[in-house]
Amino acid sequence: MNLPPDLRPASPSVTWMTPAQCKTIEAAGTNAHRLASGPGGWVERLGDDVILSYKSDDARDLLAAGLATWCTNSGWQPVRVFYRFLPMKNADRISPVLHSGDASLPLTTVVTEAGIRYGLDIGASYSHGLFLDQRLNRAKLHALKPKRVLNTFAYTCSFSLVAALAGAETLSVDLSRKSLDRGRHNLTLNGVAETKHRFVVDDAAELLPQLCVRGERFDAIILDPPTFSRSKNGRRWQVEDHFEDLLNAALEVASQKCAILLSTNCTKLDLATLERSARWCAKGKRRTADYLKLGTPVDFPPGHGSSTLWMMLR
């Protein structure tokens, strides 16, 4: 939703949250969310800080001017503002650069979502540690109250955390030990013991068949793979080529009434394509399912955020 004319920053191409919307989000115990989204970048509030992500100098200047206007009109001022350039190639990624604020403050911080605490690292070049567009899906997983959850490509384990807080046992899988260590830290931040929670450094696509052989079954599975990666053995992963293989392997460890989250940032796999793939895989495995589309949170306008679909087996 755009701001009213008297409060709207200068560019009609950028969608800004209204101060009232932000207060509603904050009242729900969340202080990490988008402030603005546009074709050239976006602005995120992370607790007391802001990261402005941009694709060009013109986009940076446009978003910066809009942020200044928004802060003046809303009465809220961030403690620090960081700028982060978004390169075309992943290899060119750099860490956010402090634009204003106290340089002596730590780059690690803690934010809340629905009252749940998440540790962030603003200095990380790829992501600070919490994908804000998954807020509705995290809430859905918590509401499902699953007993056993498999979180593949777990990153900092935000889905594992909300499942744990709902009483589930979890298995978090990621190629990065550092990311899983950050997941452990998230559990600690929320007073959750590791007793019922496993963290495995491995390629999820290679581990799934092993879990099947061991007879492990899960009643919630998170499939949110990267668009592109390479395994520890150098195996190339391309989501549009391998997503159905991943889902088929996940179906082998899915309990009778498993809820599977399908999610991707790949523009070649839109919501309709995801559902067609899911239906094809379900048919091949002789499983039946309903398909639930939650969309994206209010701070993500159309065209922004991941494509996500819940596959509810029955």
Image: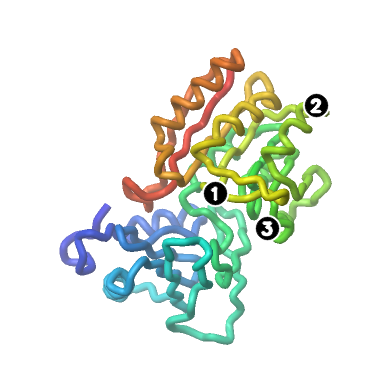
User: Above or below — where is 162 with respect to 249?
Assistant: below
Q: Which residue, given by chain and number where applicable, does mark 2 sit on?
A: 213
- Mark 2: few/some/many CA within 10 Å (<14, 14-19, 20+): few
Residue 281 at x, y percent in the picture: 55, 22
Q: Nearer the viewer, mark 1 or mark 3?
A: 1
- Residue 200 falls left or right of residue 91: right
Front residue of 71 and 208: 208
**Residue 72 visible in the current orientation:** no
Colour mapping used in the image? rainbow
- Mark 1: few/some/many CA within 10 Å (<14, 14-19, 20+): few
Circles 3 and 2, Cβ within 8 Å, touching? The answer is: no
Q: Which residue, given by chain and number where applicable, does mark 1 sit on?
A: 228
Q: Earlier in the sequence, mark 2 or mark 1?
A: 2
**Residue 171 visible in the current orientation:** yes
Residue 234 at x, y percent in the picture: 68, 50
- Residue sitting at x 61%, y 46%: 236
Q: CA distance from mark 3 to mark 2?
A: 27 Å
Q: CA distance from mark 1 to mark 3?
A: 17 Å
Q: CA distance from mark 2 to mark 1?
A: 27 Å
